[in-house]
Image: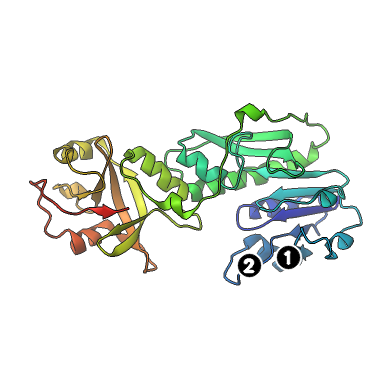
């Protein structure tokens, strides 16, 4: 069965590799990937396809004058779309004998859009999954659902970890999907249940300490591992990323009670050897974030939190609320 895969980046790579191995699929699957906008951009699926000598197209699909359509005009059977990011024109969709299908990493109709994994984490969802749908002409992520696979979102899952899990879940499900395409019932999406997952922007890196620690922690989990790297803060004139943060435990809460009247967005320490390697950020409703690692934006490697403490908080007074270690955000 002649198959053309539309995709880019890392997420669809395990899926494409599984397609490569399936006996039912022609090992010379073609790949359509996004045009290179910069030599610095990583496109892992293209690198793999190049190494394996697949036919690769990088067309401007909106340009009807290019010869791409003529090149694939010999009626491909199946189109699979995953993390492609461009609207596929109707005249290309109509070429495929068995249709074009989209793999979307959410439980549609929830989280339609460019950042479904990130937004699910940031909104403290407990479950997510992948949806296999018919492509919808002139609209993203709105086609009939053929198959959905669900997984739990663990409290420690960040974007990077959850993305890997969903990618592997999809790879493990692709053979089942292809073998049963003609058997699945097509279920229309309920428009009233639709939620949006807009792309991540620089505004999503901004931390508002009038929010609770739980909300900020979920924000960190959703951002960490994306192209934006992590949440960004500023102390004095130094910008830094939060590399590794967690919520505090009950013992830490007990120690930090003495600082509950402090201003949100201020930094504090606990006078206990067990917690000497961390610093803490006061959030709303007397909640706290524990910082274990950070990284200055102008440096390449992360550092343990105690190095920040040694550099900026050497005069910290454990028995006083009169401390002036306030973050800019």
**Residue 230 on image: x %, y %:** 42, 54
Reply above or below: 56 against 84.
below
Q: Nearer the viewer, residue 118 or 173?
A: 118
Q: Nearer the viewer, residue 62 or 315?
A: 62
- Residue 109's disc is none
Q: Nearer the viewer, residue 64 or 259?
A: 64
Mark 1 and 2 residues: CB-CB less than 8 Å, in contact? no
Could one spot residue 24 in this view of the protein?
no
Between circles 1 and 2, the one closer to the viewer is: 2
Q: CA distance from mark 1 to mark 2?
A: 23 Å
**Residue 122 on image: x %, y %:** 46, 41
Could one spot residue 177 in this view of the protein?
yes
Q: Residue at x 19, y 52 (%)?
A: 276
Examine the image and state in which quarter residue 137 appears: top right
**Residue bearing mark 2:** 37
Determine crowd level at label 2: few under 14, some 14-19, many 20+ residues with C-alpha closer than 10 A.
few
């Amino acid at each position: 069965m002649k198959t053309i895969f539309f995709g880019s980046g890392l997420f669809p790579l395990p899926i494409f590799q599984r397609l490569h191995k399936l006996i039912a699929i022609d090992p010379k699957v073609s790949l359509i990937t996004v045009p290179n906008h910069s030599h610095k951009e990583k496109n892992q699926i293209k690198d793999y396809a190049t190494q394996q000598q697949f036919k690769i197209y990088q067309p401007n699909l909106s340009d009807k004058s290019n010869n791409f359509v003529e090149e694939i005009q010999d009626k491909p059977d199946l189109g699979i779309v995953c993390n492609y990011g461009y609207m596929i024109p109707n005249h290309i969709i109509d070429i495929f004998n068995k249709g074009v299908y989209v793999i979307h990493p959410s439980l549609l109709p929830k989280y339609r859009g460019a950042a479904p994994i990130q937004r699910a984490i940031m909104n403290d969802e407990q479950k997510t999954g992948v949806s296999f749908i018919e492509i919808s002409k002139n609209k993203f992520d709105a086609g009939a659902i053929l198959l959905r696979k669900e997984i739990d979102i663990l409290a420690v899952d960040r974007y990077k970890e959850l993305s890997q899990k969903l990618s592997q879940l999809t790879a493990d499900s692709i053979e089942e999907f292809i073998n049963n395409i003609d058997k699945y019932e097509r279920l229309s999406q309920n428009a009233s249940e639709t939620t949006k997952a807009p792309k991540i922007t620089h505004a999503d890196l901004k931390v508002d300490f009038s929010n609770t620690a739980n909300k900020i922690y979920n924000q960190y989990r959703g951002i960490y591992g994306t192209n934006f790297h992590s949440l960004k803060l500023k102390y004095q004139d130094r910008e830094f990323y939060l590399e590794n943060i967690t919520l505090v435990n009950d013992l830490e809460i007990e120690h930090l009670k003495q600082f509950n009247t402090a201003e949100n967005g201020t930094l504090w320490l606990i006078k206990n050897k067990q917690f000497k390697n961390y610093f803490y950020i006061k959030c709303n409703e007397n909640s706290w974030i524990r910082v274990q690692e950070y990284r200055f934006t102008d440096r390449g490697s992360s550092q343990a939190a105690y190095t920040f403490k040694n550099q900026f908080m050497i005069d910290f007074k454990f028995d006083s609320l009169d401390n002036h270690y306030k973050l800019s955000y």
